[in-house]
């Protein structure tokens, strides 16, 4: 199935949250949707899953509009930060509802298994849970989805380190159960990076880059050393950003860079560092 | 359209709420009066039926359906058309359930409280004593009230704060300031026309009233659909 976003724009009064976004999701895999606060990640996910409408542009699944189509919307699920389910809904009731709504595209046994792994009681009402367990409640439902597209918006919000680790392992389990397009919007890039196969970086409502993990790892090189030596090398390349400390400097340079200069150290840039350097404001360059 | 899941979910929720409501009704109308008879110092008198209570209950059910059904429906990947239709059908189903429950409870209440008429309001208004007419009229009345509540809540959901204020000021102003002024200005002509329209629609005969309730219920749901078909569902 091919999910296509064409010219997607969303304006909230005088703020443009999404600006002419084009994106195509087709190949099964785990995608990371990365962006700073207010970059437009949640807005994009909300438009894809018809929670809000776009000001301009279209969202289509296999060429047909998604908005208000039960069959198309039934191919996707969004686990969002906001609680949409009734707060007095017990987890086992939510599982029954999800099964009723998604049919074969929801695995009730897996949902209960995931809940058990997180020590989430089936009789607990959503509204009575702590912030972390509210996320777990929604995560367990989303992880049990076998829909073609599953979107997670800040899935590990409020989760402790152990629960976050468990979530990532269960996500892989869910993906192995059925291959699908999984999109995770998260700020915890370092934690999620190892499992991400594609990186979509969004900034100021625009897609800044859309790369697979291989392209991502060769996208930039960090060159560190005495300022003069770094500057000499940097002049011959396209520099993303520079960070100085005393007489030392690190330049983040596009592409793979090699040098024989013994004063310089060269290493690949990890996704989190690259994200930071790509999306850093002028005011933050101190 | 995949309506079965949201419809059964809405009806299940509605039945739960109705269960709580009827527990209270039975306690108030059937159990407390016995205490009144057994214990002279504990007196309980009721001089009204519970139709009015169910009318309020159904109106509130319509009011509270909008937000909850929209959020749950969209969270479980349903389109707005399906959500609105499932809401409307579940309100109709709940109206049927409550009208049947009231039709069965009313004669029982009559045995305890002489003040309550076995045939309820429909006899008082139209003098009709047919059980089936009584059931149909009550069912359509409850459907109309719940759909009306749904429409008002839809309107409220879509309006922003200034518009909401304007609306809730404009409605009473129209009823209590504009209409009396118009009535004085045109020497009651408009008021008479309005009264006659109301009489013809609701009071002339039980048939007219049933048709009016049906038409207004359909109109309320159709308008709600138009209001909600692009409504954002991103609020907690």
Image (cartoon, coloured by chain):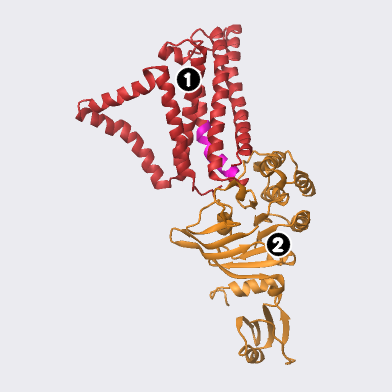
Chain colours: A orange, B red
Q: Is residue A83 visible?
A: no
The residue lying toward the viewer, choosing from A72 and B73, is A72
Name the chain letter of the residue that bears numbered label 2.
A
> Few, some or many C-alpha atoms within 10 Å of disc 1 (few <14, some 14-19, many ≥20)?
many
Calculate the distance from the C-alpha at mark 1 to the C-alpha at mark 2: 57 Å
Check contact, mark 1 vs mark 2: CB within 8 A. Answer: no
Per the rendered image, the range of residues in magenta is: B61-73
**What residue is shown with label 1?**
B137
Q: Reply above or below: B172 against B22.
A: below
Name the chain letter of the residue that bears numbered label 1.
B
- What is the x, y in percent for residue A260? 74, 92
Q: Reply above or below: A32 against B102.
A: below
Q: Which residue sits at x=55%, y=36%?
A: B87
Q: Secondary structure at mark 2?
A: strand
Horizontal side of B22 relative to A117 (left or right) equals left
Q: Which residue sits at x=77%, y=55%?
A: A170
- What is the x, y in percent for residue B57? 52, 27
Q: Which residue sits at x=31%, y=31%?
A: B176
**What residue is shown with label 2?**
A30
Identify the image quadrant of residue B24.
top right
């Amino acid at each position: 199935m091919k999910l296509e976003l064409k010219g997607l724009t969303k304006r909230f009064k005088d703020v443009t949250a999404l600006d002419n976004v084009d994106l195509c999701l087709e190949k099964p895999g785990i995608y990371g949707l990365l962006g700073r606060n207010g970059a437009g990640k949640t807005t994009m996910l909300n438009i894809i899953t018809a929670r809000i409408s776009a000001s301009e542009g279209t969202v289509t699944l296999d060429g047909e509009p998604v908005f208000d189509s039960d069959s198309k919307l039934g191919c996707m699920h969004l686990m969002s930060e906001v609680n949409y389910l009734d707060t007095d809904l017990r987890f086992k009731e939510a599982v029954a509802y999800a099964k009723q709504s998604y049919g074969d595209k929801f695995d009730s046994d897996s949902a209960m298994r995931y809940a058990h792994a997180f020590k989430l009681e089936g009789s607990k009402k959503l509204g009575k849970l702590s912030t972390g367990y509210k996320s777990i409640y929604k995560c367990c439902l989303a992880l049990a989805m076998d829909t073609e597209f599953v979107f997670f918006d800040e899935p590990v919000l409020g989760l402790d380190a152990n629960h976050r680790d468990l979530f990532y392992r269960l996500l892989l389990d869910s993906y192995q159960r059925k291959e699908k397009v999984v999109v995770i919007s998260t700020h915890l890039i370092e934690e999620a990076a190892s499992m991400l196969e594609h990186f979509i970086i969004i900034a100021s409502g625009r897609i800044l880059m859309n790369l697979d993990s291989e392209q991502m790892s060769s996208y930039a090189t960090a060159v560190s050393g005495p300022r003069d030596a770094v500057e000499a090398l940097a002049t011959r390349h396209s520099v993303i950003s520079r960070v100085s400390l005393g007489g030392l400097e690190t330049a983040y340079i596009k592409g793979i860079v090699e040098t024989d200069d013994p004063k310089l150290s060269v290493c690949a840039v990890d996704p989190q560092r690259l994200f930071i350097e790509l999306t850093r404001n002028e005011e933050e360059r101190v | 359209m995949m309506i079965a899941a949201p419809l059964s979910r809405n009806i299940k929720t509605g039945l739960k709420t109705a269960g709580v409501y009827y527990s209270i009704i039975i306690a108030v109308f059937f159990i407390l009066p016995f205490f009144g008879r057994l214990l002279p110092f504990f007196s309980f008198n009721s001089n009204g039926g519970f139709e009015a209570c169910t009318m309020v209950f159904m109106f509130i059910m319509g009011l509270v359906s909008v937000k909850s059904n929209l959020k749950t429906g969209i969270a479980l990947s349903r389109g707005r058309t399906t959500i609105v239709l499932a809401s409307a059908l579940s309100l109709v189903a709940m109206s049927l359930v409550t009208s049947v429950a009231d039709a069965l409870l009313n004669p029982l209440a009559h045995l305890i409280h002489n003040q309550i008429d076995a045939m309820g309001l429909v006899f008082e208004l139209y003098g009709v004593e047919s059980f089936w007419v009584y059931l149909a009229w009550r069912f359509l009345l409850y459907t109309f009230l719940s759909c009306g509540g749904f429409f008002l809540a839809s309107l409220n959901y879509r309006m922003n704060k200034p518009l909401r204020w304007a609306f809730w000021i404009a409605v009473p102003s129209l009823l209590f300031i504009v209409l009396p002024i118009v009535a004085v200005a045109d020497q009651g002509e408009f008021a008479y026309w309005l009264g006659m329209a109301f009489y013809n629609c609701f009071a002339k005969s039980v048939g007219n009233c049933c048709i009016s309730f049906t038409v207004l219920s359909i109109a309320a749901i159709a308008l709600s659909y138009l209001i909600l078909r692009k409504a954002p569902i991103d609020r907690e």
